[in-house]
Image (cartoon, rainbow, N blue to C red):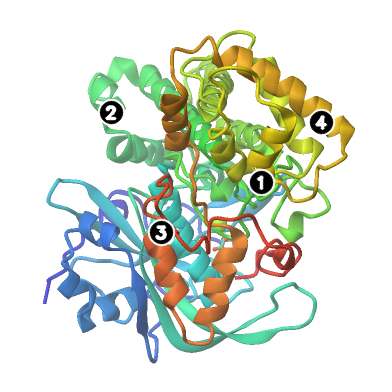
Amino acid sequence: MQNLRLESNFVDSLPADPIKENYRREVTGACYSIALPKKTKNPTLLAYSPEVANLLDFQNEFCNSKSFLEIFSGNKISDGGQPYAMCYGGHQFGNWAGQLGDGRAINLGELKNSSGESWALQLKGSGETPYSRGADGLAVLRSSIREFLCSEAMFHLGVPTTRALSLVSTGEEVLRDMFYDGNARLEPGAVVCRVAPNFIRFGNFEIVAERGDKDLLKRLINYTIEHHFGSIWESFAKRTEHQADLYSAWFHDVCEKTAILVCDWMRYGFVHGVMNTDNMSISGLTIDFGPYGWLDGYDPMWTPNTTDAQGKRYCYGRQPDIALWNLVQLANALYTVFPNEEALQSGLELYRNTYSKKWYAELGKKIGLTKVEKDDKTLFEGMLSVLQATETDWTLFFRLLAKIKLSEKTPAFSEACKTLEPAFYGSVKGNENYKSLLEDWLQRYHERISREMTNQREREQLMNSVNPKFILRNYVTQIAIDEASEGNYSTLNELLDILKTPFSENIDPDQKFTLQRPEWAKNKPGCSMLSCSS
Ligand code: AMP
Ligand code: MG
């Protein structure tokens, strides 16, 4: 049996809530409260990620042991671990919501691996904490499967993200009203162990700033930079006259990382669904997989979150602006301890520039351009209009576009349509308007590609290396969830395997998971409609 020894850097470095009892309260002057995971009656390990286990130096034997199950169901506390729940606040749907905090997440501590990396381990769904407000601190199996699979799918696409080590069913039932419509029912409970360098959110800084606690704000900022922005800390921190540069460099890095993150979401068609400031990681990771979704047909206004169906604040196309809005809230929280406002303004500017430069570069790569020229912006805009003119699958379109031969003449409309057909959700036959749009765009695309030095094979290779064949479509995850609720975990395991190589042409030979969304899934709950209830 492997002996798991955890460190408690966050707990040892930052002030604790002095109250030890577990009841709901406002917590001031502290960054966290001690909270123990709830014991589970009958835990079962449903799945684990071998890659995350490897990151933590866990052997397969340990992952399949009773000890692993005890620790990651919350039944046993590891040596050195001092479980706690973090205090954070946040802006939810544009309004300040006050104290939120880890209401259903309990941090076990940090594990240092053999490469010297420190990984924070957190159980999600393991019971009440002082931050649980009106809720029970638990998570249901459907949401836990969604978080478990999507964390790993994100990672294998190369998108910064929290990871998921394990998925454990608790053997207990949890009452949930999935659509807040008065139809509550009992669902199986589950616990996911999330793994990340840290789980610090914009909201951790916001709550301290809102309470006017400048000393604590500085301590939290310094802790964050020292432990999670190591190279910035090394460059400036030891030279006290460079305090201004330290804070400025850090905020700039946060802005840059956020820009890269959101751009990655956009290029793969990921919609987070609840981009509240409490769901924004200070390290630029995808965090809190709730009512997220992946675009099937390209539609900038699409949101998977039913709670946001009216306002569409967090729809696909608004994500870059919302991330900036969130950074502005972070800047507002930080400015009282920042030596000058300029550092904050220029950080926000850096976000805008980093985002737009990367977005155009990524769009370029998606259509096979090795570098972006000034006029390419109109080519990209034209392409997005074509994609909207008839409902077209965001993922399939680029894989199919790569197949259209562009080496000699402009491809004919009928030929191109035939190639692109698996990406269309409706028929484009007889659609004259669409025909002229696509023809016009293909001609411009052909002219542009002919200035590239790549041949057909190289262009296809480049495009296939950035355009995934597999994304974790909403309906596919729902199939895994429906089966799991009957005790069948085969699709869950199949997905866990296929998501490791999303760009490979050879995956999914039976085309079970890589075709367009079927008609039955269009409006099915769980497939396109999700709520925050989990
Ligand atoms: P989320 O929608 O996941 O970003 O959660 C927003 C806030 O509600 C966070 O403070 C969560 O910890 C809290 N929360 C969400 N679900 C639960 C739950 N089942 N029990 C306790 N707190 C919860
Ligand atoms: Mg959250």
Q: Secondary structure at mark 2?
A: helix
How packed mark 1 is, by other alpha carbons closer than 10 Å (few <14, some 14-19, many 20 or more), is many
Q: Nearer the viewer, mark 3 or mark 2?
A: 3
Name the N-terminal-most of marks 4 and 2. Answer: 2
Point out residue 86 in the picture as x, y percentages from the top left corner: 44, 58
Left/right placement of residue 313 relative to residue 62 reads right
Discs 3, 1 touching: Cβ within 8 Å:
no
Q: Kindly tell me whether residue 34 is visible in this rendering.
A: no
Q: Amino acid at mark 1?
A: Ala
Point out residue 59 in the picture as x, y percentages from the top left corner: 15, 67
Q: Nearer the viewer, mark 1 or mark 2?
A: 1
Q: Which mark is residue 498?
A: 3
Ligand 2 within 8 Å, label 2 CB: no
Q: Which residue corresponds to the image point at 79% horizontal and 50% vertical from the top-left? A: 426
Discs 3, 2 touching: Cβ within 8 Å:
no
Q: Which residue corresponds to the image point at 26% horizontal and 28% vertical from the top-left? A: 231
Q: How far is mark 3 from mark 2, CA to CA?
A: 39 Å
Ligand 1 within 8 Å, label 3 CB: no
Q: Nearer the viewer, mark 4 or mark 3?
A: 4
Q: Amino acid at mark 4?
A: Lys
Q: Which mark is residue 233?
A: 2
Q: Quadrant of residue 121?
A: bottom left
Q: Which mark is residue 423?
A: 1
Ligand 1 within 8 Å, label 4 CB: no
Q: Secondary structure at mark 3?
A: helix
Left/right placement of residue 283 relative to residue 531 reads left
Q: How far is mark 4 from mark 2, CA to CA?
A: 56 Å
Q: How far is mark 1 from mark 2, CA to CA?
A: 48 Å
Image quarter where the N terminus lies is bottom left
Mark 4, residue position: 435
Where 524 falls versus 287 (above or below)? below
Name the N-terminal-most of marks 3 and 1. Answer: 1
